[in-house]
Image (tube, coloured by chain):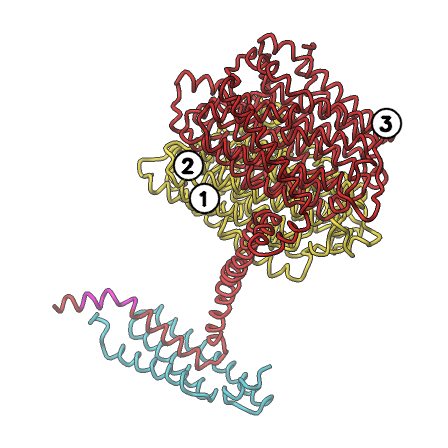
Amino acid sequence: MLPYTYLLLIAIPFIGAALTPLVGHFFPRAKGWFAVACAALSAVVVVSIIPDVWNGYTPGYTYLWNDAIGLNLTFYIDALGLLLALIATIIGLLVVIYSVKYMETDEKKYNLSRYYSLVLLFIGAMVCLVLTDNLLVLYFFWEIVGLCSYALIGYYYDDPKAAKAGMKAFVTTRVGDAFLLIGIIVLYWQTKSFNIQEIILAVETGSISVSSFALPGACFILGAIGKSAQIPLHVWLPDAMEAPSPISALIHAATMVNAGIYLILRVMPIFIDVQYWLLAIGIIGGVTMLITAIQALVEIDLKRLLAYSTISQLAYLMLAASFGVTYGLFSSSFHLLVHGTFKALLFLCAGAIIHSVGSRSMMDMGGLKNKMRYTFWMTMFGAFALAGIFPFGGFWSKDLIFASALKTSHYLFFIVAAFTALLTLLYTLRMIYLVFYRKRDDEVEAHDPSIIMLVPLFILGIGALTLGFFEHTLLHFFTNSNMHVEVVEGLEYFISVGASITIMVIGFLIFRYYVHNRDKLIALSKSGITSSLYSAASNGFYFDRFYLWLIGGLLATGRTVYHKFDIGATDRFCYETVAGGTIKLGQKFRHAQTGDLNYNMVGIVIGAILVTILIFLPSIIDFLMGGV
Amino acid sequence: MTEYLNAYTLLVLILILIGLYCLISKRNMIKMIIGIEILSKGVTLNFIATGYGGIAQALVIVVIVIDVVIVAIALSLIVNAYTHHGVINLKKLKRLRG
Amino acid sequence: MASIIILLICIPFISALLIFIGGRRTERDLGLGAFIASILTVPLLLPLIAYVQSNESYAFTLIESSRYLPFTVGFMVDSLSLILLIAISVLSTLSVLYSLKYVKALHDINSYYSGLLIFMGGMIGVVLASDMILFYLFWEMVLVASWALVTYWGETVESYRIGLKYFFFTHVGAILILVGILWVYSLTGSTSMHGLTYGSNATFSILKTIAIFFVIGFGIKMAIFPFHSWLPDAHTVAQLPITIMLAAIMLSTGAYGLMRFLFNVLPDGVGQSLIPFTLILAVITQFYGAIMALVEKDIKRILGYSSVSQMGYMFFGICSCVGLGAGGSIFHVINHGMAKALLFMVIGAVALAAGTRNIDQLGGLAKKMPLTALACIIGAFSIAGAPPFAGFQSEWMMIGSGFGIENATTLIKILSILSVCAAVFTTGYALWLVKRVFFGPSKSSGERKEVKDPSFCLMFPMLILSVATILVGIYPNLFMPLVKISAELLGLPI
């Protein structure tokens, strides 16, 4: 661990983010490399913490920040947080390197300082998010990464689709964030603490009862599904693909979307005894992975396909998390690492392809195998890892999830996960086929990217290939860090491997059928009951339409209320009843002011009579009473 | 309240009522002046009927003098109105307004 | 200390008089004088800040009550009034600075400036007065000055009608407050705002009734549903610097008054007894303002409704009677003031450049007005309560306070959850505003030649507010000690 690690963790990316515009102003060509340097320094700082954690030490430190309300920047670094921080900084570094070349063409039209500044801000915020122990600080950075995501999705701000997607992403995740905030605050009022470890300790020693944790528990789940794009808050992620591809790789595949899963894993010891808490997570994961895998099957936009795939894979992490601390936590974290690597790889490859072809639709691609040789191989690496083919990373991590499902007797979840694995294999193969193998009548111009872009691809490709073998290393890392996790071995593991291989075989057979009968299948998708299923899947199962209907209804109601209340009631009351009524009343009395002497005299006489009566009233009453 | 009820008071009341009736019902300005006169004579009579001694008498004389002045001014106004507009009817005079 | 307080109150009024007289004598625009007068109040705050942080509060009496003066002319400064003072001085100064360029072609410009200074001086008086009647006098002075500014320098002919509405609403509120003040006087025999002792004839139901008077009276000033409808109209029709004063500061004086009267003047426990009723109003206000802001087309009205919604947050924080909420509301005075002033300045620059305020005719301005767009994003995110901007620091405190109410019923819990959910709508309208004005393809109005970042005089206040918004967002300790002391003074420790 370096001296001043905690300070450096915060300072490097944030100061880098602040300085990038300045550097960009004075040395326009250097700003990319400046960002690379900052990202690299961050990565070094994070890597330097590994030995400490490996040796069973959990570094902790507190900066007093806003002591009055307990908002203190407390660091608590264990294996889980450090793993996420490593993913964020290392993939972040690779993505920034990639961007130097990839974003070059945008220099003229869009200010690249903004881009690099936001990426550095994102990396810094992500690292702080996963290393802090204070829930409120976590929320603080949780929102900042969302903010970066918003700004980077809308990076091409004059593109209405991008502007809309950015807004949609932020508002949709904000729904989850609002609930997360509720969860944090309710937890605070119940435990009088924002510190996760303190709360865990209190729960474990039984000094607070978990019976009242149902509300915060549900809120934390909602917060997580917003950030990790799970049903029903998943609609923002496919649209977020309007961001530049490196951003999709970094934020929307490898890091930020994992924050929700991380949160679930992090607070799991607090809520583990809350009834149905784990089950709810599992159900959300199971439903999400199936639905989005089907959507990925029919998607023709390359990046949107990868986005659906990401949602589906994140759902695996959710599902794995529902297996509890002992088996779930590790299998989820392991798949998180592997998925982050290969999905970043796939997005960077997709970026290279899109950059070269000039379109995101897979219908405009095809037969690229020989034109983009390196990219092709790297995509294959990523795709095999995604599909879970031996010996790529996905094979090992998915097997571990299957085995954990069996070990913890979640047989239904096992079936869902296995079936989704089949769908995953199918959409991956379809993607490979459409992009690289499909014969086209016309030629597509394409070429491999420059070496600067290829280096990150190679590094990630090696990761996708080999990470699976480091399962036990990671396990040690976790157990050394005082986490009570195990991997499944024995019968369940062999069943899972068998299942994986069966899936692989079935998948390839189905795919063979698909390639040979593609025209027939396309015709099928346009007729009968399959067509409605097809259109449902390609319309995202109408989630978007439902939300639009909801928002439209809300706005219409708002307009009605405005006309009925603000204009109809209040303004009418103000102008007609009060002002108009006063005028009308005045008009009534105006007749008294005619200047007609006779008329006035009547008034005088009546007045005089009234006054006389009033004066003599007591006497009259006395007289009458006395008479009685 | 019986102590107020005597012949003078009755006469005062009758005079006042006649004066008021005259002011309410008559449109002719000369007749209205007569109404005012009757009214003020009622008031004067009231003074004499209820008040004894020098102060009341002095006041009554003052009231009568002022009455005369009022009548004189009012009549001059009426004459002016008549010379300008040719009417002494209040209702018609009102229509000329503005 | 006393001389500083007297200076603080006198500077705006005397300079208003001088500018008015000077304006009659010469034809020159004396805006610069108004600016100097308003900026003079800022350095005067520094000794007050130093004093309050170490000694909590300072009070003094200028004139004792006597046969000829039925109330005491006395002032008091503590951390709560100091926070308001900072907001008033700084934001008024910036709004005068913004006026220098923005309202050049106005008729009777010098009367306008003197009105502005009276407006400002009145608010300073409101937060410094330590006597309820004196408070009421300043309160009405603010009302009259702002009414004149809205009406006589309104942007459209509508201003006379809307000025009437504004006056009608807020004056009814002021009368309710006066009734409450006199009622308190009848129970305590004193018009002081501090250290009142209630006799045995002050039963709880009477105190509760008085509290309702105060809540509604100040609620009208804060534009709480259903008394909100004056606000969007008045904000829209007033000249932009006036709108800034109204939205960013004057509404907050309502919050200040509510806190003072509910927690300092009335005994403990009265505010708590109103809880479901006040919280329901607060939550309705939050949602109502946010949804209306989504529906509106005029960008100034959108921000007007946004103020309604934000006041709903502050009302929620205050009426929850929890230290966290009261502290959040006090802090939000600063944060909301900065963000709202910033947004209104942005909107002014946009309207000036693009020639329209209709959101359907705007779009894609980020290309030509990059700094304005950045300022707008900062303001919007701060309003939406997103870190690292200042709004976050106070917003979570306010909306989180609902969960801290002791012995909460299910209704209160649901209201608390709803009040957090309102943040989603806030985000929705804030970002939608940014998107529709600055992003996407540029519309015809954006093609005009004038469309570019405004000149220094307009840009400078925006710059200051943007930086301050971020600074407070990442370093809340700038204000938190004051906020904490204020909450303790209100009897609601955080």
- Seen from the viewer's position, the closer of residues A526 and C341 is A526
Q: Colour of chain A?
A: red
Magenta-span inclusion, residue A373: no
Q: Classify B80 as above or below A258.
A: below
Q: Which residue is mark 3?
A: A30
Q: Which residue is mark 2?
A: C266
- Seen from the viewer's position, the closer of residues A4 and C196 is A4
Of tags 2 and 3, the one toward the viewer is: 3
Q: Is residue A259 left or right of residue A326?
A: right
Query: Residue placed farthest to the bottom in the image?
Result: B86
Tell me the chain of label 2.
C
Q: Which residue is mark 1?
A: C214
Q: Colour of chain B?
A: cyan
Magenta-span inclusion, residue A619: yes
Element assignment for label 1: helix
What amino acid is at disc 3?
Answer: Ala
Do the numbered discs 1 and 2 sit on residues whose CB atoms are within 8 Å? yes
Q: Is residue A106 left or right of residue C9?
A: right
Q: In yellow, which chain?
A: C
Q: CA distance from mark 2 to mark 3?
A: 64 Å
Element assignment for label 3: loop
What amino acid is at disc 1?
Answer: Phe
Q: In this orientation, does residue B61 appear?
A: yes
